[in-house]
Image: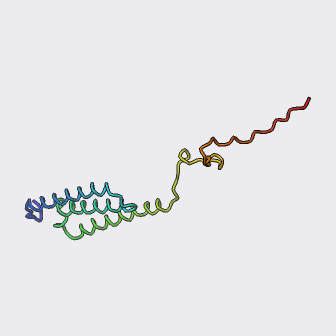
Amino acid sequence: MSEHAHSSSSSIYLIILGALLCLTAVTVGAAYVDFGPFNLIIAVLIATVKATLVAMFFMHLRHDPPINAIIFVSSLIFLGIFLLFPLIDIQSRDRVVPYGLRIQAQPAAQKQAPANGAAPAAPPAAAEHAPAH
């Protein structure tokens, strides 16, 4: 048998289940709201709270020795650090536009449309030098 028996009522599991379902609804709702550059941060925070609830109650981490909680929390901190470095690197780069999507510069004469709606004037033709007979 197990070293330490825990008397856990099913009501606590139902409460945690309700909290997880509510947090899932919050995650779905947050997906429809534009938080700008904080979208990823908010999604990761909600997921971290849900993972903590699962680890604490369904994996019985709250009844284990404190060293297990220290290892769990330190792994979350290191995961956050490892995710932070690529995020800082990506944010520090210039925006890259693929070659095929670049806007080609148009000459100034083609950009301006006549004000009165008339057809644009044709560029002056090169004078032909015909020999005089």
In this view, which residue lies farthest toward the bottom?
66
Apparent side of residue 40 relative to residue 72 in the rendered image (left or right): right
Q: Quadrant of residue 43?
A: bottom left
The image quarter in which residue 60 lies: bottom left
Residue occupying the point 33% across, 67% down: 77
| Residue occupying the far right of the picture | 133
Query: In the image, what residue occupies the spot 21% across and 59% down?
Result: 54
Q: Nearer the viewer, residue 22 or 7?
A: 22
Asked if residue 96 lies left or right of residue 25, the reply is: right
Quadrant housing the C terminus: top right
Q: Residue 67: percent from the left, percent from the top?
A: 24, 69
Residue at left 51%, top 60%? Answer: 93
Name the one closer to the observer, 34 or 9.
Answer: 34
Q: Height in image: 66 above or below 34?
A: below
Q: Nearer the viewer, residue 69 or 81?
A: 81
Q: Quadrant of the N terminus?
A: bottom left
> Does 34 appear above or below 105?
below
